[in-house]
Image (cartoon, rainbow, N blue to C red):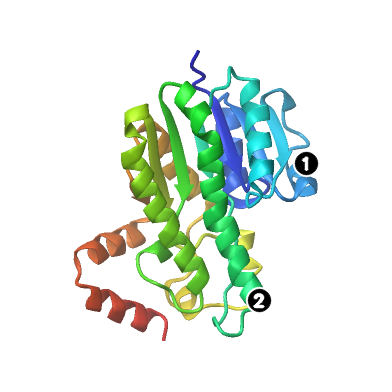
């Protein structure tokens, strides 16, 4: 039996994840909200109608935790899942050499391995649903490597590639795989950074979580492999796809000088 109104969201305690959970909860979906910070997750939802939400303390880099949470939520819905939103991600701005290697590794573990863990664990439940959608959180930084965000940018290149591969591989199962690609968003993840990259200073941080949610809603209704967020970045993205590599390098060099 298909369940059209189920969604599993990671990184759901704040920012884009929380805004997305609010949106789909208001629409009547059954929402699984997972985050490593259970206290913040509980506080963020304390006045919500709890009948249609399930909260999970989850480290997306821990595959056993991921499998357990996914199985527990989907067991309530005929072992089906309609939407997986891989939103959990971390960022650390700073020079590559001055950032501890453990921090770089953690970024890759959360942003890449976490997405792989969730997709792998969710596959049988997405497949059982008949038609289903995976939405991965990519980034404008997947267009060209961004100085002072090297490991974050690399992680989003990986998410973009995984999205493209699974979009082709899982189409035969009726599973649509896509991503959203915002520039920097006015969330706590960006605001809490100790350092600021030059590219942020030049481009500004003008996209809101609600702007991203609107694009996520478009992906649910009509999935495209990649959807950008914001008119200005959408234009830059289209130009980068047709420009020679050396032009893209020069643009990034200018933006980050």
**Which residue is located at x 34 percent, y 62 percent?**
232
Q: Return the mark for residue 194.
A: 2
Q: Is residue 8 above or below residue 18?
A: above
Q: Where does the image place residue 206, in percent across and percent down from the top left?
A: 48, 62
Q: Nearer the viewer, residue 23 or 92?
A: 92
Would you identify the image quadrant in which residue 7 lies? top right
Q: Relative to 160, is 125 on the left or the right?
A: right
Which comes sooner in the sequence, label 2 or label 1?
A: 1
Q: Where does the image place residue 117, in percent across and percent down from the top left?
A: 56, 46
How many labels sit on residues? 2
Q: Are marks 2 and 1 in contact (CB under 8 Å)?
A: no
Q: In this rendering, does residue 252 appear at all? A: yes
Q: Relative to 171, is 108 on the left or the right?
A: right
Q: Nearer the viewer, residue 203 or 31?
A: 31
Secondary structure beneath disc 2? Answer: loop
* Classed neighbour count for the residue bearing mark 2: other residues with Cα under 10 Å, few (<14), some (14–19), many (≥20): few
Q: Where does the image place residue 51, in percent across and percent down from the top left?
A: 71, 22
Q: Where does the image place residue 209, in percent across and percent down from the top left?
A: 54, 51
Q: Is residue 158 above or below residue 180?
A: below
List the single residue furthest toward the front. 64
**Which residue is located at x 57 percent, y 74 percent?**
93
Q: Nearer the viewer, residue 170 or 20?
A: 170
**Which residue is located at x 66 percent, y 49 percent?**
62
Q: Relative to 214, is 70 on the left or the right?
A: right
Q: Nearer the viewer, residue 147 or 110?
A: 110
Q: Is residue 190 above or below residue 37?
A: below
Q: Return the mark for residue 122.
A: none
**Mark 2 to mark 1: distance in Å?**
27 Å
**Tag 1 residue:** 42
């Amino acid at each position: 039996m298909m369940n059209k109104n189920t969604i599993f969201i990671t990184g759901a305690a704040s920012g884009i994840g929380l805004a997305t959970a609010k949106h789909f909860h208001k629409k009547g979906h059954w929402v699984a909200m997972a985050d490593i910070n259970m206290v913040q997750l509980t506080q963020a939802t304390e006045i919500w109608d709890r009948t249609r939400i399930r909260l999970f303390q989850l480290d997306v880099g821990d595959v056993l935790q991921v499998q357990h949470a996914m199985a527990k939520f989907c067991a309530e819905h005929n072992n089906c899942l309609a939407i997986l939103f891989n939103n959990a991600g971390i960022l650390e701005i700073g020079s590559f050499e001055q950032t501890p290697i453990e921090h770089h590794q953690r970024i890759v573990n959360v942003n890449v391995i976490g997405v792989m863990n969730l997709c792998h664990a969710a596959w049988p439940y997405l497949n059982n649903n008949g038609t289903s959608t995976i939405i991965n959180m990519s980034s404008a930084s997947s267009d060209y490597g961004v100085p002072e965000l090297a490991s974050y940018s690399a992680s989003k290149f990986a998410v973009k590639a995984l999205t493209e591969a699974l979009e082709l591989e899982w189409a035969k199962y009726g599973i649509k795989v896509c991503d959203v690609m915002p520039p920097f968003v006015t969330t706590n993840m960006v605001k809490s950074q100790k350092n600021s990259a030059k590219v942020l200073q030049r481009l500004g941080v003008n996209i809101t979580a609600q702007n991203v949610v609107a694009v996520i809603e478009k992906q649910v209704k009509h999935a495209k492999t990649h959807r950008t967020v914001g008119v200005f970045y959408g234009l830059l993205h289209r130009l980068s796809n047709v420009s020679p590599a050396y032009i893209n390098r020069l643009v990034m060099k200018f933006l980050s000088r």
